[in-house]
Structure formats: C-alpha cells, structure tokens
Image: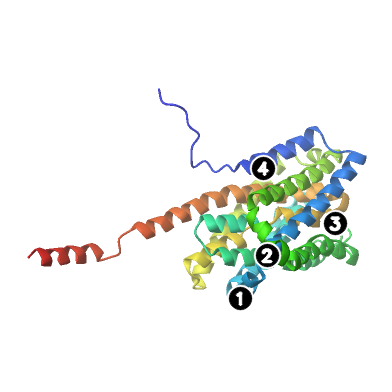
Amino acid sequence: MKRLRWPSRLPIDPYILLLLGTVGLAALFPARGPAADVASGASTAAVALLFFLYGARLSTREALDGLRHWRLHVTVLACTFLVFPLLGLAARGLVPVILTDPLYQGLLFLTLVPSTVQSSIAFTSMARGNVPAAICAGSFSSLVGVVATPLLAASLLGGNGGGFSADSLLKIVLQLLVPFLAGQVLRRYIGSFVTRHKKVLALVDRGSILLVVYTAFSAGMVQGIWHQVSPARLGGLVVVEAVILAVMLLLTWYGGKALRFGREDRIAIQFAGSKKSLAAGLPMASVLFGAQAALAVLPLMLFHQMQLIVCAVIAKRRAREASAEVTAPKPGATTRSAVGTGTRSG
C-alpha cells in the first residue's frame, strides 16, 4: 500500500497555523487586568524592535539605488494608498446588506495600511523577481504609511476612527519611524551581526507579530468581539476581501505590463502592491481605534492570512515559469546545431 503523503503544493504556511493557534490561545486564555497591561507593553516593545530590525537590515546604499527606480516605487505607492482606498470606499455600498458598519470601518482601515516588507521580499525572491526593488518598495511604503495611514484614516473614517489627533500621530511615529531610523543609524555597527543571524532574527520578527496578535485578540475576547460578528457576516467579509485581493493581484500584474515593466519588476510590483502589513497595521489600529481596535483589525487579520496563502501559490507558479524559460531551448538553436553537425560530418 502507498503511504499517505501531505500534498507538496498545498498552500498552507506553517506560520499561518501559528497565527490561527495564537488567535485560539487568545480565545481560550485572554490576557486580563495586569496581565493585559504587561502584554500590551510587551507588544509595543516588540513592534518597535521589529521596525528597528527592518532599519538595521536595509542597506542605505540599497535604499539610494532603489530611489533611482522611482517609477516602480510610485506604482507601488499608488496601488497601496490610492487604488486600495478607492476599493475600500466602493465597498461602502455593501453596508448593511453584507457588512455591518463596524466591519466596514475595519475593511476601510485595511485598505489604508502600508504594504508588507518581509513577505513581499520573500515571495519576490521565491518567484525570482527584483528583490532589491521589493526591499525598497516595502520599506518606502512603511515609511510613507507612518504619516499617510493616520491622515487617510482621519479623513475617510472621520469620527469612527477612534479619536485621531496629533498625539496619535506622535505615538505612531515614535513606535514605527524612530526605531526604523535608529536601525539605519546603527547599521554600520550591527549590520554584519544582523546579516550573520538572519534566521534567528526572523524568529524574532514572527514572534513579535504573534505577540501583537495575541494582545489584540485578547482585548477583543474581553470585549466580546465574537458576539458582535455572526458567521454570515464573517463569510461575507471573507468574500469581499477575496474579491479585493483578486482585483489588486490582476491590476498589479497586468498594469505593470501595460506600464512596460520587465518581468522581474512586475513580480516585485505584484507582491509589494497587493499586500497589507499586519505588523504596521496592528499598532496603528490600537492607537486610532482605542477600545474598538479588536474588531477593527479582524478584516486585516483575515486579509493577511488570505494574501499569504494566495501569494504563496502565485510565487511558486512564477518560479516554475522562470525555470521553464531558462531550460527551454532558444528558437532555432536545435536547427543550427543539427546543420553544423551535418556540415562537419560531410
């Protein structure tokens, strides 16, 4: 009898299982009282560490080289902070038939969040795209998002955004931008250490996000978040997010072709321009939405997991396409070889 084997192409990232497990842990054992305060402080410190490591990893030389590829970065920024919000505003017509107003506010906030850095780089590398461009595009998006996301939230969410103020913007800058700049400044001293211990620091990255997820969903459980969302509404939210992701994936790929970008650049645009950052979005939501942050980040959580699954499949497909292009014989090569051989033997 043949042994049962786990399908090699099953698009399930073990990290997604860890995220789901963290949500389950928060549902069963949510942090309360003093424990919640400790978890909140730890998650704040973890996010600051995360952005510090981003800054320490990004070579200043790479960043300056990336600036020369301005068309690609403008394209990614337009997808992230223009096209995505327009899709979010269009989804307003789904309230209250498919989405409740709180879920819509969370969905709209999702469309305002900057792009990812780590997963954009990972998928671009897997698909054999322009990795330096993905590094710079994701980093620039995160930096712009520190200012753009709160301003867009204040403009589009209005009073539902949870008390946006100059103090809120200052907190976000201190938690995200300052650590990133500190990492850039100290890169000359710790850059080689960060490069040598990439695997260990990757665990720190992912552990930081898991801690933030646990903190947010612990607060949500204490507030009774799951009693505010019915299974039908949750299913409707998933469908809406799947449509938005599909639109962005198609637009970034074929839009890049229309703008005459090369294949490697189109891969970077597709993965950097179609994604949203959980690491940046969660701390921003906690500042902008306050006590309602748990429900507000639910759409972002679902979208994050969905984009990882779908982009993993696409990245593998792009890699196979690249391999096929490399191994395929060039047109006319076989014919010329045969003719040359025949000439020599004659």
The amino acid marked with disc number 1 is Trp
* Residue carrying label 3: 287
Label 3 or label 1, whichever comes before in sequence order:
1
* Residue carrying label 1: 70
Label 2 or label 3, whichever comes before in sequence order:
2
For the point 76% across and 50% down, which residue is it? 297
The amino acid marked with disc number 3 is Val
Residue 28 on image: x %, y %: 79, 32
Label 1 or label 2, whichever comes before in sequence order:
1
Label 3 or label 4, whichever comes before in sequence order:
4
3D distance between C-alphas at marks 2 and 4: 33 Å
Question: What mark, if any, has residue 139 been given in the picture?
Answer: 2
3D distance between C-alphas at marks 1 and 2: 13 Å
Question: Mark 1: which secondary structure?
Answer: helix
3D distance between C-alphas at marks 2 and 3: 21 Å
For the point 60% across and 74% down, which residue is it? 65
Question: Mark 3: which secondary structure?
Answer: helix
The amino acid marked with disc number 4 is Gly
Q: Nearer the viewer, mark 3 or mark 4?
A: 3
In the rendered structure, the answer to whether residue 157 lies left or right of residue 130 reads: right
Q: Nearer the viewer, mark 3 or mark 1?
A: 1
* Residue carrying label 4: 235
Label 2 or label 4, whichever comes before in sequence order:
2
3D distance between C-alphas at marks 3 and 4: 27 Å
Q: Quadrant of the N terminus?
A: top left
The reply to whether the C-beta atoms of the residues labelled 1 and 2 are less than 8 Å apart is: no
